[in-house]
Amino acid sequence: MNSNADPQKTVLIAVPCYGSRVLPRFGQAREFFFAEADLVAGTLQGLQRRCWDLYDEPHLVRWLRREGIEAVLCGGIHPRFQFALYAEGIQVVWGFRGEVEEVLRQWLKEGDLANENQANPFIDETGCQPRRMIRGGCPRRSNQGETS
Amino acid sequence: MHNNPLDQQKHLATILDSVADGVFTVDEEMRITWFNRAAEEITGFSREEALGQSCCEIFRSNICFTQCPVREAMAGGRNVINREVDILDRQNREVPISVSASVLRDDAGRPVGGVETFRDLSQLQALKREVEKKYTFHDLVSRNPAMRRLFDVLPDVAASGATVLLQGESGTGKELFARALHDLSPRRKGPLVVVNCGALPESLLEAEIFGAKKGAYTGAVEDRPGRLEQAEKGTLFLDEIGDLPLALQVKLLRVLENREYQPLGARRQRTADVRFLAATHRDLEEMVDQGAFRRDLFFRINVVNLKIPSLCERPEDIPLLLEMAIDRFNRSYGRKIRRFSPEALGLLLDHSYPGNVRELLNLVERAVILSKSDILEADLLPLTPPPAVVASPDAGTPSVEQLRQLLRRHGGNRTLAARELGVNRTTLWRWLKRMTSE
């Protein structure tokens, strides 16, 4: 099976927020925008505001996983949270500022989860980010002619 | 002189750009209006990126939304000084900084915003970690020469496989030494099993250490492995061995001599492949003289004797241990306690710690749990200040303990201690000489 062949079409992305802006620090987050995004078309399909209920699920990362989140887009994030999110299979892209919707649309238009500057601490030795989050598959593996 | 306002502004900008501390100002809506060069270097954001932005989006500190120093200064009209916080820089690296904030006022004295200065503490903290590492050995912390000598011999003792007797008052960390000895020994991959000989009655202790076969006593419905068996290929740590009943001392002696033992109700001897460590707070030699401890067992366990000094014998470790305790309980309870208030520190340094390191840790843990701020105050400590030492021809000479506390309070400075006592240095020297001869 070629796992690089069909990247997932839509993903659920969580953006920590205060008001309508991206929260500067992930660790302070209680409110999120959950965005359904089509990575192939680069479009935003839906956006809804959600509150993390600490009493229902005291572990933020587990709550995000339970909600089906596959990526987090945020301002700053402590490496501790980054590790915890990666361990749950959630991709992280950081360094954003501004209005959530604007940031998302801009990122979908231009961005990619495979950002060289935001290395996954669990990155494998080929230098690949988790493939399912990268539009068009992992370019490095494709270059190496992997056909598994 | 710069009479032109534009020149004045330029001159001020040059000054602010020359200082090593980060400086920025905000307007009443917390938008950055000035950002100096050091601020650029510490945060990684350029002046152009920062100006006009909400300061929380540039600083991304752990207290931006809860205890913002600038907001506090603007709300209360008072300066906030040296608050330690963590920020995330542009590269998402955590940077510890010390922050001071004040209100910014116009010519008429009306508040128009705030000013914050901040200093990068990364190097200072790295240095602190280096110093801590220097005085740390396998969870044991000390700068006391006697303790350092123990740390030095520990690897060799651990490698030897010899039976070790750890002697020290309750709470001095005998179990930590035992753990270090095990971790440094060739048996480190095996288990470290601890038995507290004083915690169980004699009838249960035998089965606990040596194990019991099914039917050995009422209620023994199945074979039960003892701690000796559990410690196979590892280390058995017999804590409070001074409390071991005489009858069991004979049985233990046999294991130590022949490596053989018999579980309760078993017909056959078993062989133990175990390294023994023992500890006690009692004076075993005195117990031997009184007939309460077997002489032959004493010699068997006393192959290497490590005497752990009590905390009052190593007062220089108290500040180090207090720092370590704050770090430990900050991690355990997710707190950000920075330090003790001078009054609280005074009380803790003057205390005699009959319960040793365990007591110190308990005091700090309690204070960390109860504290509402990032500074531990004296009222969180269940300690009372020691009575003032008064010396006069009528009052007689102060006690040994009073002199010890006094010297500790003055960091060993005899001139200051003598001044507080109202005596000259020679008199104090004479008292101290008498104290050491006692």
Image: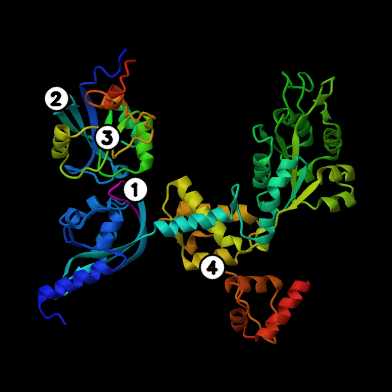
Which of label 4 and label 3 is nearer to you?
3
Residue position for label 1:
B93
**Magenta span covers which residues?**
B86-92
Q: Label 4 is placed on what type of residue?
A: Gly
Q: Secondary structure at mark 3?
A: strand
The earlier-in-sequence mark between 1 and 4 is 1
Query: Residue B426: x and y, percent?
Result: 69, 85
Alpha carbon distance from label 1 to label 4: 36 Å
Q: Label 1 is placed on what type of residue?
A: Arg
Same-subunit check for callouts 1 and 3: no
Residue position for label 2:
A41
Q: Label 2 is placed on what type of residue?
A: Ala
Quarter of the picture holding the N terminus of chain B: bottom left
Residue B403 in view: yes
Same-subunit check for callouts 4 and 2: no
Residue position for label 4:
B346
Q: Label 3 is placed on what type of residue?
A: Val
Same-subunit check for callouts 3 and 2: yes
Task: State yes or no: residue A93 in magenta.
Answer: no
Alpha carbon distance from label 4 to label 2: 66 Å
